[in-house]
Image (cartoon, rainbow, N blue to C red):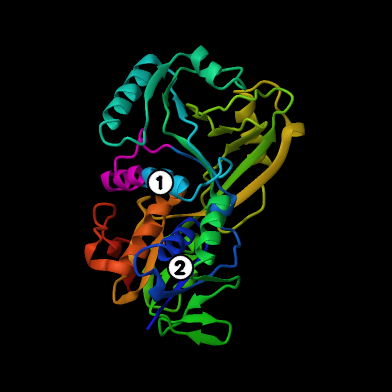
Amino acid sequence: MKKNIAIIGGGIVGSTAAYYLSKLDHKHEFNVTMYDDGKGQATKAAAGIISPWLSKRRNKKWYNLARDGATLLSDIAKETDMSKDIYDQCGTIITRDNQDKLNDLYQKALVRTKETKTIGDVFKLNANEVKSKIPLLTKSLPGVLVTGGARIDGGRFSKHLKNIAQSNNLKIVNKKVAINDEGKIQLEQDSIEYDYIIIATGAWMKNTLSNLPLEVDVRAQKGQLIELSTNSIHSNADMPVLMPEGERDFIPFSNGKLIVGATHENDKGFDLQPTSEVIDDLLASANRLVDGLNQENLVKIKVGTRAYTSDFAPFFGNIPQYENILVGGGLGSSGLTTGPLIGKLLAQSIVDKNNIDLDQYRKPIENYIKIN
């Protein structure tokens, strides 16, 4: 008899879980229903950089998750024939404002090459070499290039995986649901029982679980980014993405599109309205790297809501005392890197829980979800 599985949330975690539930062994044993109203989703608004290897974060379990997440993304892109406008392993340049910092960064990169092949080759560049790699730049600092770095469009990535899953065993319902006090899906007036439920609702997870006696460590963080047109000055070269010292992330495309951001704004709740002063700040950051950019270059503003925990680490796995309910949340600004691996691990936990080692990637889930 087939097992019925529900996924709440169609972002980076939910879409990857659906993809793997449609392709892992025993996939024909599952009926999968995704509930997603799509509102405020961080993934949908996100265009980001996949380059975790030189992060300053000291959480070893997080690094394992991000490192292996970057490798998984590369693998998914290849196995699903993903187009470059969704995922492009174009390389990443990280700049530093003095030679000692640059040397430390370079040495760290060399160490990381021994841990994973996905990082690619590593090069130390002077300021002029950075500008030659990214012809858009009129100003630059020296930096380190890692050729395995990538850019990703989160919304398109999720849509791509959901399309594949829909051709197998996934049904999508574009409605908002919650978990009721019986641990079932509450859809309007209907209470629906599933064998397993995966909850991947990001900053909304407290609301999704509010009918259960749980304390959930999640807070919302607003993120804004801007898309600029640089058609008058851009090069047709295929350029790396840039993580510039002291500035916003800088994601150029060969078609003249430039993404700048995103911001990290606490205490904004679930506000999805663009903020003029923040947009001005993002434009100013871009203009410090590329002369002449202004409001006339502004094409689009995207706003999303991330989920953070109090110690900035993600959590995932089965909820204590609710073994058929799994969660993946608190991903923060690294969600595009870590989310796909979390989604895969949740799917594997349903298929074959005994052979999955989640603890190499996470702190105890009880740190983030407690029974009241």
- Identified at 31% across, 66% down, the residue is 349
Question: Residue at (73%, 32%) from the top-left corner?
Answer: 297
* Residue 315 vertical position relative to residue 117 in the rendered view, above or below: below
Amino acid at the residue labelled 2: Lys
Q: Position of residue 207 (x, y in %)?
A: 49, 70
Q: Is residue 313 left or right of residue 171?
A: left
- Give, as a three-letter code, the residue at label 1: Asp
Find residue 302 and report its horizontal and vertical position in percent: 64, 47
Q: Is residue 268 visible?
A: no
Which residue is tagged 2? 206
Disc ID at residue 148: none
Magenta highlight range: 51-68
Horizontal and vertical percent for residue 248? 54, 33
Labels 1, 2: front one: 1
Residue at the spot 43% in from the left edge and 46% down from the top edge? 73
Instruction: Give the class, few, some or many, for how many residues have Cα within 10 Å of label 1's Cα (few <14, many ≥20).
Output: few
x, y percentage for residue 156? 58, 51
Closer to the chain start, of discs 1 and 2, is 1
Q: Which residue is mark 1?
A: 75
Nearest the camera: 338 or 164? Answer: 164
Can residue 300 be seen here? yes
